[in-house]
Image (cartoon, grey):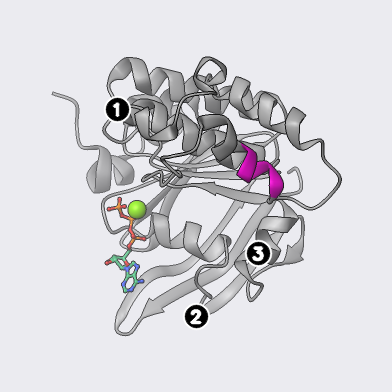
Amino acid sequence: MKPAILELKSVTKRFRGLVATDDVSLRVEPGTITSLIGPNGAGKSTIFNLVTGYLPPSAGEILFHGEQIDGQSTVAIARRGIARAFQIAKPFPEITVHDNVRIGALFGRDGPRDVAAVTEAALETAGLADFADRPAGDLTVGYLRRLELARAIAARPVLLLADEPCAGLNPAETEEICDILRRVRDRGTTVFLVEHDMEAVMRISDRIIVLDAGAKIAEGTPDEISADPKVIAAYLGTPE
Ligand SMILES: Nc1ncnc2c1ncn2[C@@H]1O[C@H](COP(=O)(O)OP(=O)(O)OP(=O)(O)O)[C@@H](O)[C@H]1O
Ligand SMILES: [Mg+2]
């Protein structure tokens, strides 16, 4: 087994009486696209909130490169190289696509950087080079999603978390997002993905982890997961 880039050890998150994440242990291996799937309310976004430091776990440990990160601030975790792309992009609409991405390059992972080059590279990876000089407010929802990824990519993450990047997109836009995520992985950034579009998940994932009601119920390759009776019962259903 390769050393994990991200490891959760018996992580539980309680909100008053509700157990949103129930004793979850999981590993994300470097160089993979690893997807976290499961029904609404399964606890997927909560795990992203725990990993990025927006929420502290109630119990358990979160390790990044073998070092404990739970309890650290969101800024400290971002500086270590974990970036997150949100489903709802909130760019500065009045400034250009380029300058929105440049803001990502100014923050993010610690270390020396050529901000201009990082910005150009992120625009190119996200397929936005031709839109660089447009105000962000002009973008359609599909391109806003690319901008949100570009902003996160510009942070030069070691681990990129993307929460439902394909939600509400048509098949062509979804394929564009899949291409971007593959490029990100192939350039050396590990991708941790939450997504409900199962066709996209099955196509691009190296590994899949399945949550149901806060607990991990399965993990494996796309083929293993799509044939797993527990996963079919909890989430995938049976094909027509
Ligand atoms: N900040 C919070 N305070 C209270 N309850 C919360 C909070 N965040 C999430 N929850 C609850 O925790 C459970 C898991 O929510 P979470 O958002 O992680 O699910 P999810 O798997 O991302 O679902 P979806 O697919 O709908 O996005 C839900 O019951 C949700 O209502
Ligand atoms: Mg969610």
> Dot 1, how many residues are within 10 Å of its Cα: few (below 14), some (14-19), or many (20+)?
some
**Callout 2, which amino acid?**
Ser
Q: Is residue 150 magenta?
A: no
| Residue at figure coordinates x 32%, y 57% from the top left | 42
Residue 58's disc is 2
**Residue under pointer 1:** 169
Q: Tell me which label, 1 or 3, sits earlier in the chain.
A: 3
For the residue labelled by badge 2, is the local secondary structure a helix, a strand or a loop? loop
Residue 187, horizontal then vertical, whole percent: 71, 26
Is residue 207 among what the camera can see? Answer: no
In this picture, which residue range is highlighted in magenta? 102-106
**Residue under pointer 3:** 75
Q: From mark 1 to mark 2, how far is it between C-alphas?
A: 35 Å
Q: Are marks 1 and 2 in contact (CB under 8 Å)?
A: no
Residue 235, horizontal then vertical, whole percent: 26, 44
Q: Are marks 1 and 3 in contact (CB under 8 Å)?
A: no
Q: Quadrant of the N terminus?
A: top right
Q: Tell me which label, 1 or 2, sits earlier in the chain.
A: 2
Q: Is residue 103 magenta?
A: yes
> Dot 3, how many residues are within 10 Å of its Cα: few (below 14), some (14-19), or many (20+)?
some
Q: Is residue 128 left or right of residue 166?
A: right
Within the image, what quadrant is residue 92 found in? top left
| Residue at figure coordinates x 64%, y 57% from the top left | 7
For the residue labelled by badge 3, is the local secondary structure a helix, a strand or a loop? helix
User: Label 2 CB, ligand 1: below 8 Å?
Assistant: no
| Residue at figure coordinates x 65%, y 45% from the top left | 159
Establish if 152 lies above or below 53: above
Q: Quadrant of the C terminus?
A: top left
